[in-house]
Amino acid sequence: MSSGTAIEDVHDGRASGRLWRIWAAVDERLGLSGLAYPVPKHANGIPYILGGISFFGFLVLAATGVWLAQFYHSTPEGARESVAYIMNVAPLGDVARGIHFWTANLVMATILLHMGRVFVTGSYKRPREVNWLIGLGLLSITIGLIFTGTVLKWDQEGFEALGHNVEIGELIGAFGFWFSPTFTTSLPIVGRLYIAHVVILPALGTFLLIAHFLLVKRHGISSRPSDFDAAVDGGPAASKGGSTFAAHLVRMVGFGLVILAVATVLSLVIRTPLGGPPDPSIEVSKPWWMFLPFYPFEDWFGLPALIWAPGLLIAALALVPFIDRNPYRSPSRRRALIIIGAIVVIVLVALVGYALVEPVKSHVGAM
């Protein structure tokens, strides 16, 4: 060995030693090595990482939301004008708003896919029933964030969405006091919905996310249905190893960055729309795609359907872990429930198609 090679090896060893000491010091204080706990190898597949992708999307929404909040005015007189300012004047405003808009759509899609995977694989079964209910709570909060975000634009679409908000509040009587414009005269309802959008709903969502993550850590990532069923039939218990949470986290961040990249490209290619100023004499808009399954019910049964139709769906989903007492998790051994779920999905998609082709009808004030 040459003297030059030996010197290089000594320097490399010293550098590695310094890096190791730095890592040891950081790990002693932050416990980062604890992230290396074992998780099943299948946890790194896309179906089992959709929840983590959704969480990364929430972080993107929070970051872009903070930037947009620097230029937004939560008053009826200034809301739409401030959005126009964001789009045309504020630095990176149009891009940030586009990323915010498209990420919200993508997160809603990944949440639905995540819950669909949990349903199909039976991962809501004991002892994970509470986490399924928490997931429904997070779904509801996401829908609330999208709804309030729609109103905050304060264009024609936002104005009509607020009209539905107010009338639904009147329908539920005393429980809808917060949705009444007369609840307080010191702050317009747009300002209160802004508080809900940036404080109340994110705070509730954060609480549920913490509970969700703690329960995932407590119970572990669910095993594959085939492995679970084999154990039920007397075979060996499914392995809880094969990978690490650190590797799982890396893949989650990687796929999350893909979501961010897609949202960024869409924001650059398709400008996020802003409708005209509100006109109380007309009703010309339809809701976002995640609300469209309930739009036909509003046509057929009026505004009260916007309470009982989604309410029945959420209640049915909440009961799933307690109705499905089948000890197995494979879809092939839970055919009846899987068929019912497939029918519900087909009906919801058909309702979306119907809502897309149905002419806009006036609902607010039509009771």
Image (cartoon, helix red, strand yellow):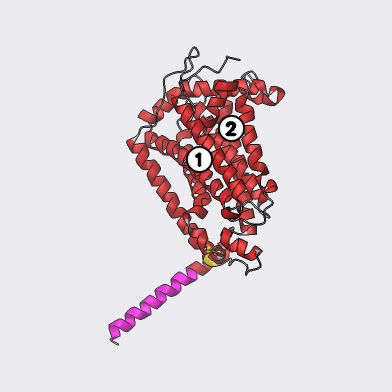
Main SS of residues in magenta: helix
Residue 265 on image: x %, y %: 35, 41
Residue drawn at 47 percent across, 17 percent down: 278
Residue 362 lies within the magenta run: no
Q: Which residues are magenta?
A: 2-22
Spatial separation of the CA atoms under disc 1 and disc 2 = 18 Å
Foreground: 139 or 234?
A: 234
Name the residue that disc number 2 marks: 196
Q: Quadrant of the N terminus?
A: bottom left
Residue 47 as seen in the image, left or right of residue 338: left
Residue drawn at 49 percent across, 49 percent down: 53
Residue drawn at 63 percent across, 54 percent down: 214
Q: Residue furthest bottom?
A: 1
The quarter of the displayed image where residue 29 is located:
bottom right
Does residue 188 show up?
Answer: no
Residue 267 on image: x %, y %: 37, 37
Foreground: 362 or 93?
A: 362
Check residue 108 in the rendering and tell me which mark sits there, or answer none.
1
The quarter of the displayed image where residue 97 is located:
top left
Residue 6 lies within the magenta run: yes
Does residue 40 show up?
Answer: yes
